[in-house]
Image (tube, grey):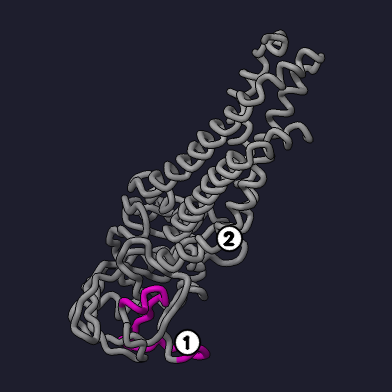
Amino acid sequence: MRLAWHNISHERTRFFVTIIGIACATLLMIVQANLLFGFLGASSRIIDATDSDLWIAGRGAPCFEFPVTLERRFAEIAHSIGEVESTSRILTRIVSFRKPDGSQQLVTLIGADRDVGSEFPIPTVSKDSGAIEPEALLIDESSSHLLNPSSQMPSPVEVNEFRAHVAGLTSGFSSFLGTPYVFTSYSDGARYAAIRPTETMFILVRLRAGAQLQEIKQILKARLPNTDIWTKAEFARQAKIYWTSQTGAGGAILVAALLGFFIGLAVVSQAVYATTMEHIEEFATLKALGASRLFILRVIVVQAMACGVVGYVVGVAVSGPALDYVRSVIPWLGAPSWLPAAILPLTLAICILASILSVRAALSVEPAKVFRA
């Protein structure tokens, strides 16, 4: 360890450049991982906010944002099953939103029955009242500057040329589509989105306590053969798979994270190799004195690991302010608290891989090199 630290500290400029490279790679991996986790969470946020056990969707609907219309009577068919406690409806459609100043904005309108979920934003007359406020809209606070720049409540607007008003704000539902989410009751949403009374888009099924989820799912499949029946977890997973694999967005984020890994690998490889070659005669001396190959390998790997740990600490320290800034631009950014700890093994893996060239050079040097003039 002392020898490794001596080799590193002897060239402080190179050590500093190596740390900066590792810190940048760590920062890039953390930011990209936050983007990926945030994107996955946002892609299924509407589904996760419901209290449903099963979703009935039109055949071929890949996610919530691209629905296929259903017959409304399917809700009564589902409710006729004894183990079903309740059914509710939810719809979505991209519509025009005319602001008080006359300008227009496309929004993703979401209309839902009152009992779709306790965490689901539905405009009610008051917090303690279950009565739904007519012609009322809720918008996410992340898009309030865009849809309600005056911040006045209620704010008169038009949705698809129908009169409405912004009644309040919600949080945690920032859109990743570029069209902000706007929430309303199902009846108003159907009117704004021009959905016929005999149609709906999604039917949510809640089961009684003790009901067998998979058994009810198979019964619904038999009774409604032209629909897709998903459990809540399955539909959320399907939405994540669709947005990451079929749109290319998730792949682009993952590629950027891999680029961070390879950037760090290249920077550390160059620095560790240069340090090793500069002290190549010292390694030849060690071999002439009888040092084992394992000892030399440990010296080089410890050099790389020391650079990696210091660079990791710097990268994590910088990531806090960097993520705060990114969240001001991308509200749905988010990741689990264990992510920085998970990045540490990747950073150390970069350092170990980077030391391979240096190890080969040090182990292949001839001990007799030290005796040459």
201 is higher (above) or lower (below) than 358: below
Circle nearer the N terminus (2, 1)? 1
| Crowding at mark 1 (Cα within 10 Å: few <14, some 14-19, many 20+) | few
Question: Would you place residue 346 above or below residue 111 in this image?
Answer: above
Q: Is residue 135 magenta?
A: yes
Residue at image mark 1: 130
**Which residue of the protein is positioned furthest toward the front in this rendering?**
373
Q: Nearer the viewer, residue 362 or 25?
A: 362
Q: Is residue 112 left or right of residue 130?
A: left
Query: How many numbered dots are placed on residues in this image?
Result: 2
Q: Position of residue 261 (x, y in %)?
A: 51, 39
Tag nearer the camera, 2 or 1 = 1
The residue closer to the viewer here, 175 or 56, is 175
Q: Which residue is drawn at the image coordinates 51% and 70% (left, top)?
A: 85
Coordinates of residue 118 in the picture (x, y in percent): 52, 75
Asked if residue 91 lies left or right of residue 45, the reply is left
Q: Is residue 79 visible?
A: no
Residue 117 in view, yes or no:
yes
- Which amino acid type is shown beneath numbered disc 1? Gly
Question: Can you give x and y, in whole percent of width and height, for residue 351 in the image?
Answer: 61, 35
Question: Is 65 covered by the magenta stretch?
Answer: no
Mark number displayed over residue 210 = none
- Amino acid type at circle 2 is Ala
Quarter containing the N terminus: top right
Residue range of the region highlighted in magenta in the rendering: 126-146
Residue at x 32%, y 87% (from the top left corner) = 150
The residue at the point 63 percent across, 54 percent down is 338
State the SS at label 1: loop
Tell me where residue 254 appears, x and y as whole percent. Answer: 44, 44
Q: Which mark is residue 211?
A: 2
